[in-house]
Amino acid sequence: MKCVVLANGEYGPLERYSSVVLDSDLIICADGGANYAYEMGLIPAYIVGDMDSIKPEVKEFFAARRVTVKKYPRRKDFTDTQLALSLAEEMGADEVVFLGTLGKRLDHTLSNLYSGIELAMMGKQVMHYSPQCVVYLTARRLVIEGQKGDVVSVLPLSEKALGVCEKGFEYPLENVVLEKKNPYTVSNTLAEEKGEISVEEGILAVFHFLTSDG
C-alpha cells in the first residue's frame, strides 16, 4: 500500500506533485501539511499533529468532510511527521512518499530523513519528493531512472554501509565500504538513463537531483 505523507515544509510549484499522489492508497497530513493538501484538492484520510500550523479555514473545510483528526499536545516526544509515519505503518503501508520534508529548515530535513531509517531497514520503500530533488532511503537495491548527466549523491545514514555498489554511473563503485565520517560519494552522474545502487549492510540516502524541464 502506497501512503503519501504531506508535511508542512517547502513545496514549490504544486502542480509538479500530481503524478506523485495520483496512485496513492492513503493520504496523511502532518499538521500544516493539510494546507497544501487543500491547495492541491486532496482529501486526506487523517490529519495528525498538535494543530498549531493548520489554517482555521482548512481545518473547517476538512472537518465538514469528516476527515479524521488525531490531535496531540504541543509538548510531545515526537514530531508531527513522525506521528504521521507511525500511523502509516499502523495502517500497513509498505511504500511511503513524503512531500514537504526537504528544505526550509536543515534540522527538520535531517529529522525527516532519519525518521524513515527503521522503515527502510524493514525493506519498505521510503522516498522524499520535491520538484528539484528526490531522496530515497534504501537498505537493499535501488534503481534510479532519469536523464543522462543527472547528479546523484549517496550518503550512509548508518555509521558504515558495507558492500556498496553503483552501476550505470560515471564513477562506478564495486563492493566498497562507506563511512558516515567520510562522505565522499557525492555528485556522481548517471552515465545512461538508468543506474543501480545496492548495499549489503547498512542504510543509504540516495539524492537524485532532477534535471529541470525548463
Image (cartoon, grey):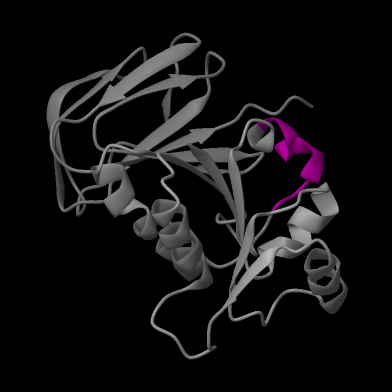
Relative height, residue 163 to residue 106 (above, below): above
**Residue in front for this viewpoint, 173 or 72:** 72
Q: Which residue of the protein is positioned furthest toward the front in this rendering?
A: 66
Q: Is residue 23 magenta?
A: no
* Residue 178 x, y percent position in the rendering: 17, 40
* Residue 54 x, y percent position in the rendering: 73, 74
What are the residue bounds of the magenta stretch? 11-19
Can the viewer see residue 170? no
Can the viewer see residue 28? yes
**Residue in front for this viewpoint, 63 or 5:** 63
Which quarter of the picture shows residue 186? top left
Q: Going by the image, does 62 lie left or right of 51?
A: right
**Residue in front for this viewpoint, 84 or 138:** 84
If the image is split into quadrants, where does the C terminus sit? top right
Relative height, residue 214 to residue 37 (above, below): above
Which quarter of the picture shows residue 181? bottom left
* Residue 197 x, y percent position in the rendering: 30, 24
Which is the main secondary structure of the residues drawn in magenta?
Answer: helix
* Residue 140 x, y percent position in the rendering: 24, 30
Q: Going by the image, does 198 lie left or right of 131?
A: left
In percent of the image, x 45 and y 51: which residue is there? 91
In percent of the image, x 83 and y 78: which residue is there? 56
In percent of the image, x 56 and y 68: which residue is there? 105
Relative height, residue 164 to residue 60 (above, below): above
Across the whole image, how many numbered discs are drawn on residues? 0
